[in-house]
Image (cartoon, helix red, strand yellow):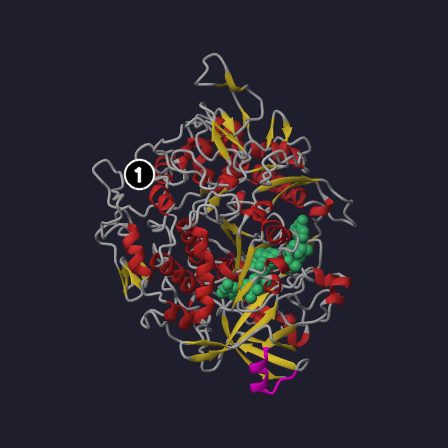
């Protein structure tokens, strides 16, 4: 979230699109109700299904799954055509006026740089600004240059007319226009909208671009940096925010630093390529500090062994040749290229697409280690469970080890919530039986490996032998020790450059924040964005002061938020260039003559006076929000509507030659397993229910009683056409396999008219399987295709093709 849970109460308009917060985030959803009750905010829900969120909405519009870029691209077109823009914001704080290179082009579904022979965007250099002789981007503040971002954007989305939008999305035109009008109101300075989204947007082959399109709308309206605004990803698992913060994605290091690639063979190349240079004068360009964060990380990991002479241990880091996302890993496993797999708090048989492929892949392993408090469907994948998992046990040689772990309620620690708040918690009970914390299992494994390397040698041993391991009990590092390490310490006295003779931190002290981190090895920090969470003043995450002087809900004394305890990101953009808030009722700061003071921690130099040319989007080298995303995204600088990989219409009304996302990565066998709409005419979409949490609450009798068995939701029109009644058993099949389930015939899913054709959705909740106390069921992911978003590789769980029969 750019903002945070409580801040939702400050919105005038809440759009839930690409999520179902009432069901999946019922506790946080209270702030939506708070906004409705205390300020008369309106709630709009756009979803293929009339959900529990929709049931309390002021306005609901249906949409075909996988077509939100068409919808929001249409919103962009409508906002421009109807002049519903916060112009001063757009001109001051965005790249609207930046001039794009002459060789950038878009034609018939493809952007410039497409290499037809390789089926790739081999060269993205044209997706960039024109630079002057000093390397600064050229800008036309009047927005008249035909090559400026604004005019290219206007042109790009002019194709997204209300009729085209309705034809692609199936949203009736009047309903689409109603949402445009409600959003258009929020171009006013004192009206702010927030978008709440989750998997309904991310689980698509164009997922990341769904989110970009919304960010563009919010930027046009001037809602970024505002209390009650922003783009708000409602995260899933408890602490999944912490997972990405700590760099558990395969090409990341902690704090969103890049892991070096195999092309960056030496430190100088890596650090130069990953440290951006400002592309406009006088900008903060915060990532310019990358060397400080990187060196501090290496000092945390390798301690005294990391020195300037050995480039802080750069050679000990793995270098990636490709992304090792879970799709990639299971593909390699299926190809027999992996011996072992550690499965920690993950139930891939149930959770990952194309269950039959997952089973085939696991069957190729020599060993599988399950670290989990429970028996999962993955831990017994080798058992024949009848029709639900019809495997030949005798032919599977995989040895399975089960290591019982504790769960979060049985240990102390911090959890990072969607609003980036690190909240410390204390264990509620001791773990039963032989369960031990994950950390102890990993520590034990490390110590054993190091012992083996010590005794026997062998390459590559350096990363393990050089790791710093200074915990009081080596086989059981304490959560407190780990938390302090993530914050970081001064390894020498750190002089204060502004006050000679004084120090920002003394040797051995916890650093007060990331501004103190150094690139010369005199500081260590395990995750620079967490610096400030455990300072000399103690554990900031355990703070529980909910005083809220501004009434905006920022409660700066409650827990601690990264970065720097800031609650609303880009908050300098809540004011005009002269420091006047766009909306006095949402004022976050005042300039007191020396610095900014107020209801949040400034996302800006605290002593940079009003009127300065420094822009508020400090993480960008040009300091502004991007409508045009320079050379970053896989499929283009402007989001474009592409059909799901399995399209119910088999064409793209905008450009029939390029139907689906051309930049997706698909493995050969999986492409052969894509279905066509003549055989699989219905849109399958998967989702969760309040009564279950994924695949583990089926072990809990009460949850199992509330939602005992797999069902699928079917609209009345389709049920009638197929002669299916409420409660019948049905078979739902895709190119990957089939499931059997009970039919729930509902008014909540309506047929949509798409490109002149009737399209039906079939809703498939995801929670059952063959383990647990709930009724044994099929695994929903038997149906889903093995393809991910082109940027993130999040699987396309939300839109695929199925057929339906009475069982
Ligand atoms: N009770 C409960 N709560 C949970 C979980 C749980 O298992 N149980 N899981 C947690 C986790 S890990 C996560 S990630 C979150 C997920 O939170 P959500 O994303 O909110 O949950 P989902 O039910 O997967 O799907 C959201 C909605 O997206 C809609 N949708 C599908 N396709 C599209 C589309 O193309 N466009 C639009 N606009 N909408 C679409 C679906 O109809 C569905 O209503 O929930 C978390 N909360
Ligand atoms: N078709 C379809 N598939 C989906 C989705 C969808 O919407 N549609 N959603 C996807 C999403 S967003 C998610 S997040 C995944 C969820 O997929 P998983 O993460 O695989 O699902 P969970 O059942 O939450 O499994 C987590 C496991 O962690 C264990 N666990 C709990 N606490 C601890 C702990 O402290 N330590 C260890 N080691 N284990 C612990 C639990 O017992 C459980 O078995 O499913 C994905 N799959
Ligand atoms: Mo999730």
Ligand 1 is within 8 Å of the C-beta of the residue at disc 1: no
Q: Is residue 87 visible?
A: yes
Vertical arrangement, residue 310 with respect to residue 435, above or below: above
In the figure, is residue 36 to the left or right of 81? right
In the figure, is residue 286 to the left or right of 47? left
Point 57% across, 62% down: residue: 58
- Res 165 → quadrant: bottom left
Q: Which quadrant does the C terminus fall into?
A: bottom right
User: Which residues are drawn in magenta?
Assistant: 715-725
Give the labeled residue for mark 1: 279
Neighbours of disc 1 within 10 Å: few (<14), some (14-19), many (20+) = many
Q: Is residue 153 part of the magenta span, yes or no?
A: no
Point 50% across, 14% down: residue: 502
Point 48% across, 12% down: residue: 501
Vertical arrangement, residue 93 with respect to residue 207, above or below: above
* Magenta residues, dominant SS class: helix
Please provide percent x and percent y for residue 683.
51, 74
In the figure, is residue 772 to the left or right of 358? right
Between 243 and 225, the one lying in front of the other is 225
Secondary structure at badge 1 equals loop
Between 330 and 800, the one lying in front of the other is 800
Q: Is residue 371 visible?
A: no
Please provide percent x and percent y for residue 555.
61, 37
Give the residue furthest to the top: 501
| Quadrant in which ligand 3 is drawn | bottom right
Please provide percent x and percent y for residue 386.
67, 76
Q: Is residue 720 part of the magenta span, yes or no?
A: yes
Between 543 and 573, the one lying in front of the other is 573
Vertical arrangement, residue 279 with respect to residue 372, above or below: above
Point 33% across, 49% down: residue: 630
Please provide percent x and percent y for residue 188.
43, 49
């Amino acid at each position: 979230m750019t903002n945070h849970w409580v801040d939702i109460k400050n919105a005038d308009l809440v759009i839930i699109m690409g999520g179902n917060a009432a069901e999946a985030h019922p506790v946080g959803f209270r702030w939506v109700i708070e906004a409705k009750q205390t300020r008369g905010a309106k709630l709009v829900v756009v979803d293929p299904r009339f959900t529990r969120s929709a049931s309390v909405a002021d306005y609901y519009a249906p949409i075909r799954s996988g077509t939100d870029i068409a919808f929001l691209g249409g919103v962009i077109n409508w906002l421009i055509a109807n002049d519903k823009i916060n112009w001063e914001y757009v001109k001051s704080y965005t790249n609207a006026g930046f001039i794009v290179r002459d060789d950038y082009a878009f034609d018939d579904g493809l952007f410039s740089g497409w290499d037809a022979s390789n089926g790739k965007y081999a060269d993205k250099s044209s997706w960039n600004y024109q630079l002057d002789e000093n390397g600064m981007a050229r800008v036309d503040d009047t927005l008249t240059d035909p090559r400026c971002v604004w005019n290219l954007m206007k042109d790009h989305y002019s194709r997204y007319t209300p009729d085209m939008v309705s034809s692609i999305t199936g949203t009736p035109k009047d309903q689409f226009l109603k949402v445009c009008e409600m959003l258009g109101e929020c171009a006013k300075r004192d009206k702010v909208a927030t978008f709440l989204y989750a998997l309904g947007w991310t689980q698509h082959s164009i997922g990341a671009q769904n989110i970009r399109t919304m960010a563009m709308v919010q930027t046009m309206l001037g809602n970024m940096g505002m209390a009650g605004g922003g783009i708000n990803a409602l995260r899933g698992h408890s602490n999944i925010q912490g997972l990405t913060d700590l760099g558990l994605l395969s090409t990341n290091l902690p704090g969103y630093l890049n892991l070096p690639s195999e092309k960056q063979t030496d430190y100088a190349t890596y650090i130069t390529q990953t440290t951006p240079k400002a592309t406009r004068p006088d900008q903060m360009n915060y990532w310019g500090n990358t060397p400080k964060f990187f060196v501090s990380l290496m000092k945390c990991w390798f301690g005294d062994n990391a020195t300037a002479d050995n480039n802080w241990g750069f050679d000990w880091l793995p270098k990636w040749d490709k992304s090792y996302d879970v799709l990639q890993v299971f593909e390699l496993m299926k190809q027999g290229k992996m011996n072992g797999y550690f499965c920690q708090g993950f139930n891939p048989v149930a959770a990952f697409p194309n269950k039959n492929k997952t089973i085939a892949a696991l069957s190729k392993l020599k060993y599988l280690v399950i670290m989990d408090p429970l028996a999962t469907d993955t831990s017994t994948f080798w058992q024949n469970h009848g029709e639900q998992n019809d495997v030949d046990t005798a032919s599977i040689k995989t040895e399975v080890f089960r290591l019982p772990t504790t769960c979060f309620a049985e240990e102390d620690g911090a959890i990072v919530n969607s609003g980036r708040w690190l909240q410390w918690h204390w264990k509620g009970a001791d773990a039963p039986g032989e369960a031990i914390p994950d950390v102890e299992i990993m520590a034990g494994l490390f110590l054993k490996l190091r012992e083996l390397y010590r005794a026997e040698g062998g390459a590559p041993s350096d990363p393990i032998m050089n790791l710093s391991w200074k915990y009081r009990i080596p086989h059981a590092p304490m959560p407190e020790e780990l938390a302090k390490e993530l914050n970081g310490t001064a390894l020498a006295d750190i002089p204060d450059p502004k006050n000679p003779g004084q120090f920002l931190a003394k040797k051995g002290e916890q650093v007060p924040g990331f501004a103190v981190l150094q690139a010369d090895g005199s500081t260590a920090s395990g995750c620079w964005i967490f610096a400030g969470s455990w300072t000399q003043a103690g554990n900031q995450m355990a703070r529980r002061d909910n005083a809220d002087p501004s009434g905006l809900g920022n409660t700066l004394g409650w827990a601690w938020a990264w970065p720097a305890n800031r609650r609303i990101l880009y908050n300098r953009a809540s004011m005009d260039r002269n420091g006047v808030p766009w909306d006095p009722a949402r004022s976050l700061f005042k300039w007191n003559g020396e610095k900014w003071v107020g209801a949040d921690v400034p996302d800006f130099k605290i002593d940079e006076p009003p009127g300065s040319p420094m822009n508020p989007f400090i993480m960008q080298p040009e300091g502004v929000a991007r409508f045009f995303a320079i050379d970053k995204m896989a499929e283009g600088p402007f989001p474009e509507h592409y059909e799901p990989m399995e399209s119910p219409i088999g064409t793209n009304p905008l450009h029939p030659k390029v139907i689906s996302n051309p930049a997706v990565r698909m493995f050969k066998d999986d492409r052969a397993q894509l279905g066509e709409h003549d055989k699989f005419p219905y849109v399958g979409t998967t989702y969760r229910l309040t009564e279950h949490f994924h695949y583990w609450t089926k072990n809990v009798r009460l949850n199992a009683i509330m939602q005992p068995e797999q069902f699928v939701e079917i609209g009345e029109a389709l049920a009638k056409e197929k002669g299916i009644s409420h409660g019948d058993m049905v078979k739902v099949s895709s190119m990957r396999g089939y499931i059997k389930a009970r039919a729930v015939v509902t008014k909540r899913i309506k047929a949509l008219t798409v490109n002149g054709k009737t399209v039906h959705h079939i809703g498939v909740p995801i929670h059952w399987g063959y383990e647990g106390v709930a009724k044994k069921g099929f695994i929903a992911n038997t149906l889903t295709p093995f393809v991910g978003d082109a940027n993130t590789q999040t699987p396309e769980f939300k839109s695929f093709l199925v057929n339906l029969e009475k069982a």
